[in-house]
Amino acid sequence: MSTVLACALVFNLSVPLVPQGSIPDAFGFKQVELSKNVSQLLRSNADHIWSYNRDPRVLGDLVNYTDPYGTISGDPHLGNMSVIPVQTKNGQNVMRFLNVDFDDGGKGPFALEYARFVLVAKASSKDIRAKDLFNAYFQGLQGKEVAMPKSIAKAMSMDMQTYEAQRAAYVAKKMVDGHFKYKAGEIEKWDGYPGLNEVKSLFPGVRVIEVAKRPLERGGSLDAGERLWVLTQSKDGSYHITELKPYVDTALHEYSRQADAYERVEDLHEIYWPGINPSAYDLVEAGGNKYWIREKKVEVLSYKNRAEEDEARIYIANIIGLTQAHQPEGPKLLKMIGKDPERFKDAIKKYVKDYLGLANASMD
């Protein structure tokens, strides 16, 4: 049996393969007109690439590395990693550099998770070098950590009191007279469902003041439905804004069947938020619909220039490798790549070149 056919059977591909030599869904990207550049386009189209990946022929030699399988984020890129305050399961409040958006996560090939990351990195930075990304990723697969960039370390060093002051100031700017400060395109009135009564049960022990909607201009969740903001007041008098983001199925379902939503999210928490209280970013139900719930955070991590961004991308490549190394099939991929690293790098290079060519063509 050929490798291509074997791959198709393993992943239960139910869509017909395209004719030899052609590329599927050449102009199937969403939000082309709304995207200012290819980087934005890719970040809004995680589902497109996983649909694209279902045809083993577009993967080229990369198809030979798709067997090692495990939990992946489905949409790894710089914007989905940040420093945020979280609470550990033993009740300690800490700042951590974490994946803050694994909505498109689930089960999939490790190699394609890394390929997706390289794609967006190359689309976002003309200076990033694929070999630097690979070296960091490969070290991660070996269980080796690279040095944390100074920009990230600085954000991690913020004390919780300073963060709380910044968070409170952010919320105050969104309020007037104890309610949301409404402004078209930013925070708008919400008279829909679920409303105030339906979301109150999600916030036990606090005062729920009102529910508003937060319009989106673009992004992977643009078509998911209204994103809601809930204004609450804690017993200590502090105000908080919590976002309810409509749940949609992971982009990875375009590639292969995925587990039930709650089972999938529990697994993602174990992999991406180990030892952390998951309630800060979890699935809930309100008015019969599922939502991602998370308090609005203040952005404490900033990059001064592209060089700092690229340092962070290299660091994230290492984290991707480490995350895979700690899963059962990580050593398997390490062994496969280790036999001929140049071959793997060439496979990634060709795959990235082909897909970026497709994305660029869609914007012409």
Image (tube, helix red, strand yellow):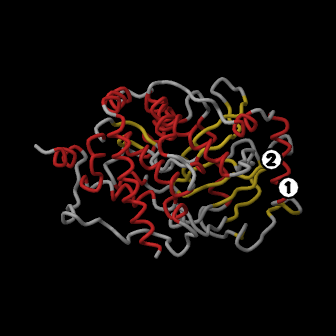
User: What residue sits 47% from the left and 41% below the top?
Assistant: 131
Between residue 339 and residue 140, name the one nearer to us. 339
Q: Is residue 10 visible?
A: yes
Question: Considering only order in the chain, which callout, 1 or 2, is on the residue closer to the N terminus?
Answer: 2
Residue under circle 1? 172
Q: Judge left or right: residue 301 versus residue 271.
A: right
- The amino acid at mark 2 is Arg
Q: Amino acid at mark 1?
A: Ala
Label 1 SS: helix
Position above or below: 227 against 329: below
Residue at the image position 36 percent from the left and 35 percent from the top:
341
Number of numbered discs present? 2
What x and y, as percent, mark residue 253? 36, 52
Please rate how many residues cluster around mark 2, counting C-alpha atoms within 10 Å: few if below 14, some from 14 to 19, many from 20. some
User: Residue 57 has which mark?
Assistant: none
- Disc 2 vs disc 1: Cβ atoms closer than 8 Å? no
Q: Position of residue 348 (x, y in %)?
A: 38, 47
Give the quadrant of the N terminus: top left
Image point 72% across, 68% down: which residue?
Answer: 186
Given residues 180 and 271, the one toward you in this image is 271
Percent position (x, y) of residue 290?
51, 53
Q: Which residue position holds label 2?
A: 167
Helix, strand or loop under label 2: helix
| Residue 281 visible, this orientation | no
Few, some or many C-alpha atoms within 10 Å of disc 1 (few <14, some 14-19, many ≥20)?
some
Q: Residues under labels 2 and 1: Cα distance? A: 9 Å
